[in-house]
Image: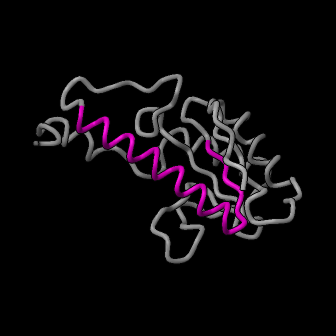
Amino acid sequence: MIATDPATSARMSRQRRTGTAPELALRRELHRRGLRYFVDRAPLRGQRRRADVVFPRRKLAVYVDGCFWHRCPQHATDPKNNGRWWADKLAGNVARDRATDEALRAAGWQVVRVWEHEDPIAAADRVQAALSAEPAPGPTSAGRARPHDSTPPSPR
C-alpha cells in the first residue's frame, strides 16, 4: 500500500520537527520568566527521542505535541485517504509517546506534555510548577498525566 500521494508527501516534508509556533510561544514565555533550558535534546543518553524543552538538572522533559500527530482528544482528525495506514501511524505515535514517558519516569524524570492548542502562559505555569515541585522519592513518583487525558499515569 502506498502511504501517501505526492502532494501529501510534499506537505508532510514541510512540517517542522522543531521550532513550531506553539513551541516557540512556550519557549518565549519560559525565557521571559527567567527559566533557562536546552532545546531539542534527548533527555536520556542512548535514546533517539528528543524533548522540545529539557531542564537536565531538574530532570524535566517538556514535549509540545501537535493535535493531529499525537491524537489530541479535543482536536484529532482522521485523514480521509489511506485511513488504515494513518490510523496505524498515529496509533504508533501515541504508543511511542507513552513508552517515552514511561522510560523517562523510570529514570527519575518528570514529563510535561503540552498540546499545541494550549495557552502558552498556562503551559508555562505547568512547567514552572513541575520545576518547583520537590520530586518524591522513587523513580516513578514524578509522573504527570497528559492534559485532557482521562487515564492517569499507571501506578508502580
Which residue is rendered at x = 19% and y = 42% of the image? 10
Which residue is nearer to you in this view: 41 or 59? 59
- State the residue in front, 48 or 90: 90
User: Percent x, y for residue 139?
Assistant: 75, 65
What's drawn in magenta, residue-wise?
A: 84-113
Would you say residue 28 sits in the magenta stretch?
no
In this view, the residue in front, 50 or 101, is 101
**Quadrant of res 153:** top right
* Image-based side of 125 in relation to 9, left or right: right
Quarter holding the N terminus?
Answer: top left
Residue 102: x, y in percent? 60, 57
Q: Position of residue 56 (x, y in %)?
A: 70, 68
**Residue at image location 66% in from the left, 65% down from the top:** 106
Counting every numbered tag in the picture gives: 0
Magenta: main secondary structure equals helix
In the picture, which quadrant includes the C terminus?
A: bottom right
Q: Residue at x 72, y 35 (%)?
A: 121
Q: Nearer the viewer, residue 148 or 17?
A: 148
Report the side of 12 relative to 142 (left or right): left
Asked if 152 appears above or below 45 in the picture, the reply is above
Which residue is at 59% across, 63% downward?
103
Is residue 89 found inside the magenta-colored segment of the image? yes
Q: Residue furthest front?
A: 156
Judging from the image, the colouring scheme is one colour
Percent of width and height locating residue 41: 54, 65
